[in-house]
Image: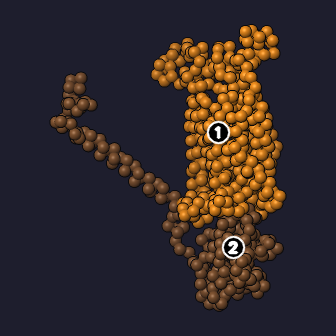
Amino acid sequence: MSFPWAKQYTPSHPAMVWLDEKLPLPRLIYGAVGAGYEVPRNLNYFWNFGFMAGLCLMIQIVTGIVLAMHFAPDTGLAFDSTEHIMRDVNWGWMLRYGHSNGAALFFAVIYLHIFRGFYYGSYKAPREMIWLLGVTIFLLMMATAFMGYVLPWGQMSYWAAQVITGFFTAFPLIGDGLKEWLLGGFAPDNATLNRFFSLHFLLPFVILGVVILHIWSLHIPGSSNPTGVEVKTKADTVPFHPYYTAKDGWTVGLFMVIYGLFVFYMPNSMGHPDNYIPANPMQTPAHIVPEWYFWPFYAILRSFTQPLLFIPGKLMGVLAMFASILVWFFMPWLDKSPVRSAKFRPLYRKFFWALVLDVLVLGYCGVSPPEQPYILLAQLATIYYFAHFFIIVPIVSSIERPEPLPFSITEAVLGHDGQAALAAKG
Amino acid sequence: MAQDAGIDTPTADGGSGDGALDGGGVRRRDFINIAAVSAAGVGGLAVLYPLISQMAPSADVLAESSTEIDLAAIQPGQAIKALFRKQPLFVRNLTAEEVKKATDVDNNASEFSTLRDPATLAERTKPGKQNWLITMGVCTHLGCVPLGAGPGEEMSRGAFGGYFCPCHGSTYDTAARIRKGPAPRNLEVPPYEFTSDTIVKIG
């Protein structure tokens, strides 16, 4: 599970020796996220977002559990109990703002983590399973965030529940029944709110479980690195602790500054004022948009205004929206290039940035009203999005001539030192 | 060792143990094994049914509800929203001009054939009550409430004069038929009947 030169756990205190014999939990932690885990020495700051994502999950679980102590999942009480948290509960405002802004920053961190994976080819063999588990975590996060958004039972909550469960009515024959089953009624109501609360409580722990699998499968090949060249010798790695615990600690501090800015100075900047109006099943808000982290997918959903290949536009939109994330699962096999890092892939790199731009355009269309020119723009961006995965990535990875890779991680790091580089090249 | 412990353990070749039949074939232990695993499997699946079914609408939600609406106060061109099965219901008194707009489409074969969900105004209203357009106020796209029935929404009825869904731009005509945008079907017409000239019973 690690490199042969990794340090072994050697407890010195008799109590720790005793514990190690009975339950080697400290040994597990030492090997997983301690001095026993050897990590490439050349990681850049993009490798910090995994640790930060773990921290975000912890923040969400802790703030969420205490919020649940004050919240009442009943359509008659949910909105008021949320306001009770905001006004009456000691520090309730901080906990709720911390939870809602924490969710948004969790997505920001995860998107940067995914960005890293795409740019540096982290999904490639032998790390496919880490990637598959990561995409699974992302899907679970989306479901969890959606159900959490419904809980305050404001106007945006209610209509999010209506619209998102409405996706399922797109499926022929079973659609309407499926929606009624999910909602427990014909429209979002008490049954819906109650089950969403139950699942919103459960899913973070499911995510935690998949995170453990994600880290477990990471520790078999070890972390990737910006060159994409695998670890060869002891000189290529440093122990996770203290080197990367210290580096992660520094960015956690930066994260906390940004998090604090949102929670304490602009807690509603990412929210929507309509959600401070109690849910009203008779009136849809004039302009409903999801939270910013769903905008690109929302734009894909509503790009399909006409039937395509005899499939109704509504069903196509829903299928395309799900497909836009599910296609990530296939990245390890769509990208055939043996070179991992885009740093050495001049052609792929250009298309990578084009995709980033495309996703930003989709996000812009997602938050804009459903009218021209945004509809046409979103349609073009949607076509490009799928073309990237199904046409551009396979073709580019077949025809591209990558730049020469460094011999080793050590050479890449000490390359500025001409002698070391020359010596390594022999 | 098994004999030492007083337990008879069958071996893989079926040569010993009280479950073995002479000359091979099905051993009693195999049968017990398959029966036990099958019972556990079928039992496990059987438990899934109530676990899944509990999420479906409960009896109180399903209990048939009907709503009575007094039409007397609704002027031509005006629409109201009522509640039916916890969902909005649109009741609209079409003007003669709006009725004509809808029937013009019905009588023009080439235009009628372009409808996404073809139905005439006559099919979507009651005989002799063509001006009373009664539909669910639930967009068939993703379930938003279209604009056009609420107070002050007369100017937001979209390009076809019926209803306009602000969520994704679905546009309905004066027979509440889908004409433009992502919705697949016309606004649903619930079961209803006129109990008198001015009272309509929904459901």
Residue at 68 percent of width and 66 percent of height? B183
Residue A420: x and y in percent read: 76, 10
Q: Quadrant of residue A376?
A: bottom right
What tint does the image give chain B? Answer: brown
Q: Please indicate whether residue A251 sits to the left or right of residue A5 in the image.
A: right
Q: Which residue is more in the foreground, A296 or B197?
A: A296
The answer to whether one can see residue A162 in this image is no
Q: Amino acid at mark 1?
A: Leu
Quadrant location of the N terminus of chain A in the rendered image:
top right
What tint does the image give chain A? Answer: orange
Q: Which mark is residue A334?
A: 1
Q: Chain of mark 2?
A: B
Provide the secondary structure element on which disc 2 rests.
loop
Q: Which mark is residue A107?
A: none
The answer to whether one can see residue B159 in this image is yes
Q: Amino acid at mark 2?
A: Leu
Query: Does A222 appear above or below B101?
Result: above
Residue B91: x and y in percent read: 69, 79
Residue A268: x and y in percent read: 78, 49
Q: Quadrant of residue B169?
A: bottom right
Provide the secondary structure element on which disc 1 rests.
helix
Residue at 30 percent of width and 43 percent of height? B34
Q: Which residue is more in the foreground, A74 or B121?
A: B121
Query: Does A196 appear above or below B195?
Result: above
Residue at 72 percent of width and 29 percent of height? A341
Between the residue at mark 1 and the residue at mark 2, the CA separation in whole angstroms equals 41 Å
Residue on which the image places disc 2: B115
